[in-house]
Image (spheres, helix red, strand yellow):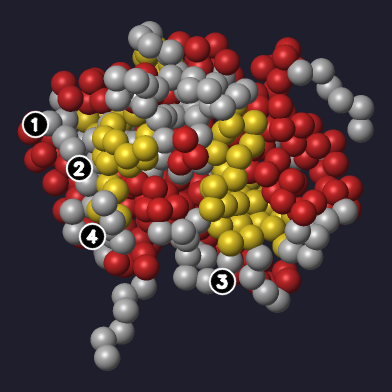
Amino acid sequence: MQKQKPYLESMPDINGFFGKFGGAFIPPQLEQPFSQINEAYNKLSKSFEFLHELRKIRKHYQGRPTPVYYCKNLSDMIGGGQIYLKREDLNHTGAHKLNHCMAEALLAKYLGKKKLIAETGAGQHGVALATAAAYFGLECEIHMGEVDIKKEYPNVVRMKILGAKVVPATHGLKTLKEAVDSAFEAYLKDPVTQMFAIGSVVGPHPFPKMVRDFQSVVGIEAKEQFFEMTGKLPDMVCACIGGGSNAMGIFSAFIEDAVKLYAVEPAGKGDKLGEHSASLTYGSEGIMHGFNSIMLKDSDGNPAPVHSIGSGIDYPSVGPEHAYLNNIGRTNVGLCNDDEAVEAFYKLSQYEGIIPALESAHALAFAMKYAKENKTESILVNLSGRGDKDIDYVIENYPIPHK
Ligand SMILES: Cc1ncc(COP(=O)(O)O)c(C=O)c1O
């Protein structure tokens, strides 16, 4: 009998499809540059030098491995399941985004590109890419919605200090989706010397696969570290999901294990269209930004307006692999609204001395609810980033609670 290929080797297929989701729906002028990126990635992902270089960067520059931490105070306070964090907030630049940015920039360097171009929501991908560009001596241009520029100002300043040009997206809701539109437009003007370093497991093939593979270091480390600490695997792993790169990073190590996986979506401030960005929960199949997935649509079938307090997760779609895994029942969806995220933000700060990013606070808030109901389980949360960028916004809008 023929042995089945491991999941990560068999998905996506050669054309970038996870079942019916994924693919590359791109204009003809992008076909050549995307196929060049795909070929280069296929070659480099098997090259000793590329992997050795990346390993060196991860260890000596990024500060990996990041630890897994047991939240004893928080778990005791909840009185239920045990909560552990994978501390991606301790990765250099303060979030998981640098894991794929360093690799994308290394790939760009190999391809002889001069400039990196990308979108950013919370500014974390922008900061990470600007950092990678500085490291590799490349130019960098980051597109960001005008609303997010105001909200995530510390990250805008960081990008500029790092030498990046920040271009405001001024149309529509002026948030993450518009930033992607704007970056795509700028990239289309010169796909030869520029590389679009997409910030999540979204976009046309090969980005969903490539970004997942670059983020898989999170899951590989976490699985080993958790086992070393507890002698077993966690019962449940959860992560917040915008496009879904931090979630795919940690899920990828557990897909073939008997571990429950929860993708936590932003329930925002209500269940009406425009009040949330819970694409898997309320969306339907559609194509946007070059890939087929589940998306939130308005009555004309266009991407719907979305909202979340977490600027990095207010996106009207999800990576195609998430759509697939959810569709086949391998992953579950959790929901967390704005207020619950802020409550978790303060709880982690006051009980553990860790200020989380508002995006990551969504995963934590869901884990806290889950722990109350599943008292014997151990829960591993991907703490995708730190909250320094969010402190001004939180303090101006939500009073500090008494412990
Ligand atoms: C800290 C943090 N977590 C999560 C996300 C969401 O991205 P993804 O769903 O690709 O992990 C972002 C995006 O900016 C972020 O900054």
- Could you tell me which secondary element the residue under label 1 belongs to? helix
Residue 388: x percent and y percent?
66, 28
Residue 326 shows in the view: yes
Q: CA distance from mark 4 to mark 1?
A: 23 Å
The CA distance from mark 3 to mark 2 is 32 Å
Q: Residues within 10 Å of mark 3 (few under 14, many from 20)?
A: few
Q: Few, some or many C-alpha atoms within 10 Å of disc 4 (few <14, some 14-19, many ≥20)?
A: few
Q: Residue at x 66, y 65 (%)?
A: 235
Q: Which residue is mark 2?
A: 24
Q: Which residue is outermost to the top?
A: 170
SS of the residue under disc 4: loop
Q: CA distance from mark 2 to mark 4?
A: 12 Å
Residue at image position (40%, 53%) is 327
Which secondary structure, mark 2?
loop
Q: Quadrant of residue 24?
A: top left
Which residue position is annotated with label 3? Answer: 258
* Amino acid type, residue under disc 4 in the picture: Asp
Query: Quick check: is the Cβ at mark 4 less than 8 Å away from ligand 1?
Result: no
Residue in the foreground of this view, choosing between 390 and 317: 317
Residue where numbered disc 4 is placed: 13
Residue 15 rendering spot, x and y as whole percentages: 18, 54
In the figure, 363 relative to 358: above or below?
Answer: below
Which image quadrant for residue 199?
Answer: top left
Identity, as a three-letter code, of the amino acid under mark 3: Ala
Q: Which badge, 1 or 2, is on the more N-terminal residue?
A: 2
Residue 349 placement (x, y as % from top left): 79, 36
Q: Which mark is residue 29?
A: 1
- Position of the N terminus, as image quadrant, is bottom left
**Distance in Å between CA atoms under marks 4 and 3:** 24 Å
Q: Are marks 2 and 4 in contact (CB under 8 Å)?
A: no
Name the foreground residue: 30 vs 26: 26
